[in-house]
Image (cartoon, helix red, strand yellow):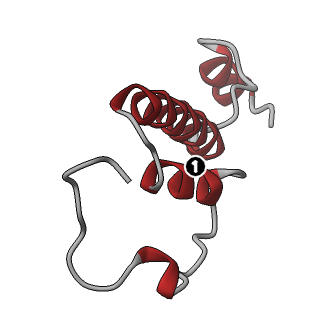
Amino acid sequence: MLAGVSMPGKEFDEYELPRLPDEPEGWRELQKKARNAQSLKELDAILAEMNRLLAECEKKAAAAEAPPASTQPGEENEKRTTGEK
């Protein structure tokens, strides 16, 4: 743990938090490493990796929510006027 930094109450390892449905692989290990970081440089590197994993998850989630890009611009209008499906 970083010198001079303490968390009130229970230690993190005393209980297990529920796993999130889309939790990135390796997330829990990074959390544990961050809690046990011995220097600000080490913590900074861990946080950078955590941010990278979160950005990757956000991209995947956005791609899953985006409508499929199966039509070209104007193609949908052409289908409506010709009756194509």
Which is nearer the eye, 32 or 67? 32
If the image is split into quadrants, where does the N terminus sit? bottom left
Write down the quadrant of residue 6 in the picture.
Answer: bottom left
Q: How many marks?
A: 1
Disc 1 is placed on an element classified as helix
Q: Residues within 10 Å of mark 1 (few under 14, many from 20)?
A: some
4 horizontally vs 54: left or right: left
Question: Relative to 71, is 39 above or below?
Answer: below
- The image shows residue 59 at horizontal and vertical percentages of 57, 34
Compared with 12, 3 (above or below) is above
Residue lying at 24% horizontally and 84% vertically, measured from the top left = 9
Instruction: Give the residue drawn at x 50%, y 87%.
Output: 15
Determine the residue located farthest toward the top in the rendered image.
Answer: 73
Q: Residue furthest front?
A: 3
Q: Is residue 50 above or below residue 24?
A: above
Vertical placement of residue 25 versus 8, above or below: above
Residue closest to the eye, 6 or 23: 6
Q: Quadrant of the C terminus?
A: top right
Residue 79 image position (x, y, % from top left):
71, 25
- The picture places residue 65, in percent across and down from the top left corner, at 58, 46
Q: Which residue is mark 1?
A: 30
Q: Residue at x 64, y 39 (%)?
A: 60
Between 65 and 30, the one nearer to me in the picture: 30
Q: Amino acid at mark 1?
A: Leu
Along the horizontal axis of the image, is 29 left or right of 12? right
Q: Is residue 59 left or right of residue 70?
A: left
Image spot of residue 67 (x, y percent):
62, 38
Give left or right: position of 78 versus 14.
right
Q: Residue at x 40, y 29 (%)?
A: 44
